[in-house]
Image (spheres, helix red, strand yellow):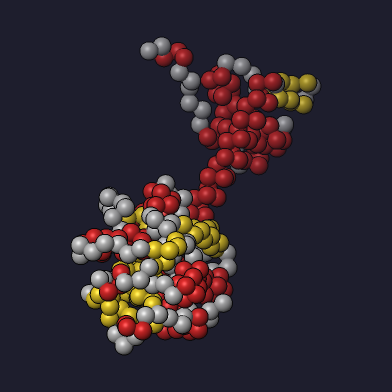
Amino acid sequence: MNNSKVPKVISSKALSYFAKLAENLNYTKTARMLGITQPALTQQIKKIERNLGTPLFYSVGKQIHLTDAGNILLKSVNEIYASMIDTIDNIQQSTSSTTGTIRLGILSSIENSVLEDFIIQYHNIQPEIIIETVLLNRRQLWDELENNHIDIALMYLPDDSIRNWRPYRTKRIINEDLILLHNNPKLAEQTTVTLQEATERPWVIYPDNYYLTEFLREQFKNNLIDFPEYMGRFASPYLILKFAQAQQLYTALPQSFIMANQPIVHSQQAHFSPDLSFDLSFVYRKEKDHIPRISTFFQEWDHYLDLKSYTDRLQDAVSF
């Protein structure tokens, strides 16, 4: 390796002295501002010039001016300082508990009225923190988590669509049941319905690859029961409910959605036997624990539920 081609190191102190001199174009004034002697300032400038092999200033009478090389170096130093300011700002943003952005990915089939109310209240507590939310299906959620495009996912667990859980933490919110909605007089007196009984009429369900559809398919498969016939597949739980009630179809929706939307639920309700349940949870990468605004977000969330439980807040939700 030819060491003569390796650039010599110029200290940040020398560059800061150069930048200040380039601003003032006066050795005496600059030395006074820096709190050093004029010979010390001259020595630092000469050191840079020796390393670069070219003068940075020239004199016309008593006035100094930047050479072409000096102008090139000054432009680079200013760009470095601007980049450093941006870097420092980004670091401060990422380590601040009161500023920055929190990006939430929400499983689109989740009843999120409690989270929405919390976000509104959280803004009153931390007005400098920007909350961003996106509605995604389960595969999109995992992609966004793995690529670090969202900070926190709100989703149902367990979910076997990701194999490596090592980078992630979970924070359980509630365990909830899947509820069968029907208008079958034969089942009107039953509080529980078997999977076999739930195949007697056609269904309306979520699209393929949605968590609840895959969850249901797995339950029927594990019990060696054919998946029921379905007459529609919709991404919106409101449309699923509306379509099922209008067409006298079966469907199954999370208990949280039913609790938050009781005024529009006219179907008969029954739990499955055995219970079909899952956890509503936050999922996030482990390193997010070290970001103050994320830990503060969770602390405020816990306090929010300490004041009134998630279930009670669901029952207080207003259906639009």
Q: Quadrant of the C terminus?
A: bottom right
Q: Is residue 17 something that shows in the picture?
A: no
Number of marks drawn: 0
**Residue drawn at point x = 55 percent, y = 72 percent:** 120
Q: Which residue is rendered at x = 46% and y = 82% of the image?
A: 266
Image position of 301 (left or right of 278): right
- Image height check: is 308 above or below 229? below
Residue at the farthest right position: 61
* Rendering coords of residue 263 (x, y %): 50, 84
Q: Position of residue 74 (x, y in %)?
A: 65, 30
Q: Residue at x 32, y 64 (%)?
A: 228
| 2 and 200: which is toward the camera | 200
Using the image as rendered, state which of residue 34 and residue 246 is in the foreground: 246
**Residue in the picture at 53% in, 81% down:** 318
**What quarter of the picture does the N terminus occupy?**
top left
Q: Residue 20 lies in what quarter of the image? A: top right
